[in-house]
C-alpha cells in the first residue's frame, strides 16, 4: 500500500491536471459531436463544413475551461498570446479530424451517419493526444513563481 501512496503523491498534480483536462475534453467532445450531428444530419451541411464549425465552437468552450480550471495554476502569459496559440494548435488538431472524415467520405465513399461519426471519433482521439501535449508545451506554460491555491484575504483597516 505504501508503494501506491508514494506513486500517488509523486504524480498527484499530474493526475489532477489530467482529470481536469479529461473533464473539459469530455464536455467539449459532447458539444463538438452534438453540433457536428446537428449541422450534418439536422441542417444537412457537408461533413467537413459541419466539423470545422462544430470544432470552432467547442474549442472556444475548451479554451475557457482549460485556462480557468485545468491550467489555472500555470503562468498566464497574456490572453491574446494564449488564445492565438490555442486556436492555432486546435487548427492543427482539427486537420486530424478533417483528414479522417475526408478520407472516410471521399476515399472510402462512406457517407452514412454512422461511418462519419466513427471517423469523427477517431479524428477527435488523434487530435486530443496532440492538444494535451501541445497545450502544456506552448500555451499554458509552467508558472515561474508559485501561484497560491486561494487568493489571500485583504485586511481592510478602519481607523476610528
Image (spheres, helix red, strand yellow):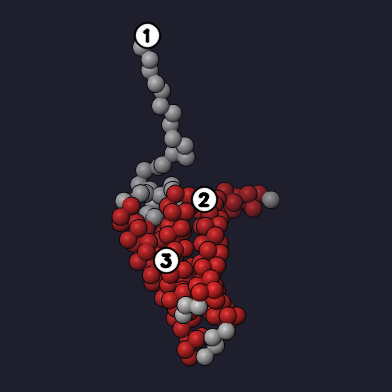
Instruction: Tell me, yes or no, whether the two marked residues, 2 and 3, touch with CB atoms within 8 Å.
Output: no
Q: What crowding class fits label 3: few (fewer than 14 Cα within 10 Å), some (14-19), or many (20 or more)? A: some
- Residue positioned 46% across, 59% down in the render: 62
- Res 140 label: none
**Viewport quadrant of the C terminus:** top left
Disc 1 secondary structure class: loop
* Pick the front one: 102 or 21: 102
- Res 56 label: 3
Mark 2, mark 3: which one is toward the viewer? 3
* Pick the front one: 98 or 77: 98
Residue that label 1 marks: 160
Residue that label 2 marks: 13
Mark 1, mark 3: which one is toward the viewer? 3
Residue 50 visible from this viewpoint: yes
User: Disc 1 and disc 3: Cα gap in Å?
Assistant: 56 Å
- Residue positioned 47% across, 89% down in the render: 106
Instruction: Tell me, yes or no, whether the two marked residues, 2 and 1, touch with CB atoms within 8 Å.
Output: no
Q: What crowding class fits label 1: few (fewer than 14 Cα within 10 Å), some (14-19), or many (20 or more)? A: few
| Mark found first going from the N terminus, 1 or 3 | 3
- Residue positioned 43% across, 31% down in the render: 152
Question: Measured along the vertical axis of the image, is residue 52 above or below residue 66?
Answer: below
| Mark found first going from the N terminus, 2 or 1 | 2
The residue furthest right is 1
Query: Residue 16 location, x and y as percent?
Result: 54, 52
Q: How many marks?
A: 3
Amino acid at each position: 500500500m505504501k508503494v501506491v501512496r508514494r506513486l500517488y503523491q509523486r504524480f498527484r498534480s499530474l493526475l489532477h491536471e489530467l482529470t481536469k483536462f479529461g473533464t473539459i475534453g469530455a464536455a467539449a467532445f459532447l458539444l463538438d459531436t452534438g453540433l457536428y450531428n446537428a449541422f450534418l444530419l439536422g441542417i444537412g451541411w457537408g461533413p467537413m463544413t459541419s466539423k470545422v464549425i462544430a470544432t470552432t465552437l467547442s474549442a472556444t468552450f475548451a479554451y475557457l475551461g482549460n485556462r480557468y480550471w485545468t491550467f489555472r495554476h500555470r503562468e498566464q502569459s497574456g490572453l491574446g498570446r494564449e488564445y492565438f496559440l490555442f486556436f492555432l494548435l486546435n487548427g492543427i488538431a482539427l486537420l486530424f479530424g478533417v483528414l479522417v472524415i475526408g478520407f472516410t467520405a471521399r476515399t472510402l465513399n462512406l457517407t452514412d451517419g454512422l461511418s462519419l461519426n466513427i471517423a469523427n471519433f477517431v479524428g477527435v482521439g488523434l487530435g486530443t493526444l496532440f492538444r494535451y501535449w501541445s497545450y502544456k508545451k506552448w500555451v499554458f506554460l509552467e508558472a515561474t513563481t508559485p501561484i497560491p491555491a486561494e487568493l489571500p484575504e485583504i485586511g481592510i483597516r478602519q481607523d476610528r
